[in-house]
Amino acid sequence: MKVLYYDCFSGISGDMNLGAMIDLGVDENYLINELNKLSINEEFSIEIKKDERKGISGTKVDVILNKLEHGYHHNEEHHHGEHHHRSFKDIEKIINESLLEESVKVISLSIFRKLAEAEGKVHNKDLYQVHFHEVGAVDSIVDIVGAAICFQYLNVDKILCSPVQLGGGFVKCAHGVIPVPAPAVMEVLKGVPVKMGAVPFETTTPTGAAILKTMVSKFTEEKEFIVEAIGYGVGNRDTEIPNLLRVYLGRVEKKQEFYFKENCFILECNIDDMNPEIYDYVYHKLFKQGALDVFITSIMMKKGRPGVKLSVLCHKDNKEELKKILFKETSTLGVRECSMVRDVLKRDFSVVKTSYGDIRVKKAYVDEEDVKVKAEYDDCKKAALEYNVPIRKVLREVYNSIK
Ligand SMILES: O=C([S-])c1cc(C(=O)S)c[n+]([C@@H]2O[C@H](COP(=O)(O)O)[C@@H](O)[C@H]2O)c1
Ligand code: NI
């Protein structure tokens, strides 16, 4: 199983994510070619270079907004300092009408939706009323669609993430000066383990947060995988801590499970006043009704009376029928019930041909090497009686033939 792990000790932004993905091994030409399938491809270009923070080298990605001769930037409608805005609907259209792969469209749209929902919540607007600032919209489209292209390229089974460092201080944006963590970041990362204040700057942006929240299946510090590749995405600042996003590509050794869990019940009653000859009959009835096991434990009851605890292991579906048998066929006035989980070894059945006929054999697997083999007692008993031989002779032949 392939795992992608985000180590967000210095947070995450959309650009850092793209840098980390390329550093990890995503083919940059593939990423650029795929991004060019967007109709807005003339509005941006992508600069990819090696850079470093605190001596640790990684990949830095910058989304450069192109100055168009004809287009939004010089469009009459957007003079007088007004900005063109793209709504969530516009972005849905751009993504849906592109020639990007279907899975890339689905991932991109769900990341965008998460971002738009958070912005909507913070600014008290409906999802479809949220407008992305012109410059931010192109940047976010490249960061988010780029992230989706990388996920599709890496084709991992699971994405995990450390607690996310959000930073601190204040940041200037289109709304003015806002606190860090930015409100949209907090909204997106509700319920996610985060850390704050490592540096007095913004380390995690709304786009970075939305990528994580959409894609990560578990936020954990446990790294139960073998690291096969490491990537560093370089951030814009040079802070006291290296402004890097570290990602690991890992492999989880497939552990074969030899047992499975099963819900079951124990029915119990204490008896000190019943003819002991009857237990054989009760056992027979309980097993016939589907009891998984029936057993008796000697107990000392009140008034110094020796008695027994009759226990019945069963599944839920025949529990009530089994209780009825206990009430009808024994002297008890009450039955206790207790739910439990049992671990059951995987097993298979086969038939061994012996000179005494066919004998059924059960194999239960403790692990790859350790197998418990058991000849079916009833078959051995029948064969021993039929051939008038000691039962151990039958057993020996069975075990010798399956060695
Ligand atoms: O809507 C805008 S411009 C906006 C809202 C918020 C909220 O938290 S609400 C935050 N910001 C800041 O803009 C930059 C860019 O973020 P990206 O995710 O687009 O990379 C970042 O500093 C945000 O905190 C902008
Ligand atoms: Ni906002």
Image (cartoon, grey):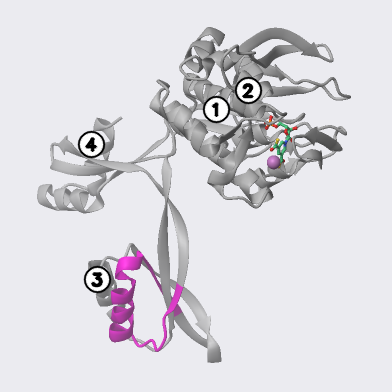
The residue beneath circle 4 is: 397
Mark 1 Cβ and ligand 1 under 8 Å apart: no
Magenta span includes 323: yes
Q: Tell me which label, 3 or 1, sits earlier in the chain.
A: 1
The quarter holding residue 21 reads top right
What is the spatial separation of the Cα atoms under label 1 and label 2, in whole angstroms?
Answer: 8 Å
The residue beneath circle 2 is: 248
Q: Residues within 10 Å of mark 3 (few under 14, many from 20)?
A: few
For the C terminus, the image quarter is top left
Nearer to us in this view, 154 or 249: 154
State whether residue 80 is above or below residue 177. above
Amino acid, disc 3: His
* Local SS, label 2: strand
Quadrant of ligand 1: it is top right
In this rendering, the label closer to the viewer, 4 or 1: 1
Q: Which residues are magenta?
A: 308-337
Dots 4, 1 in contact, CB < 8 A: no
The residue beneath circle 1 is: 3
Amino acid, disc 1: Val
* Local SS, label 3: helix
Q: Tell me which label, 1 or 2, sits earlier in the chain.
A: 1
Dots 1, 2 in contact, CB < 8 A: yes
Nearer to us in this view, 160 or 271: 160
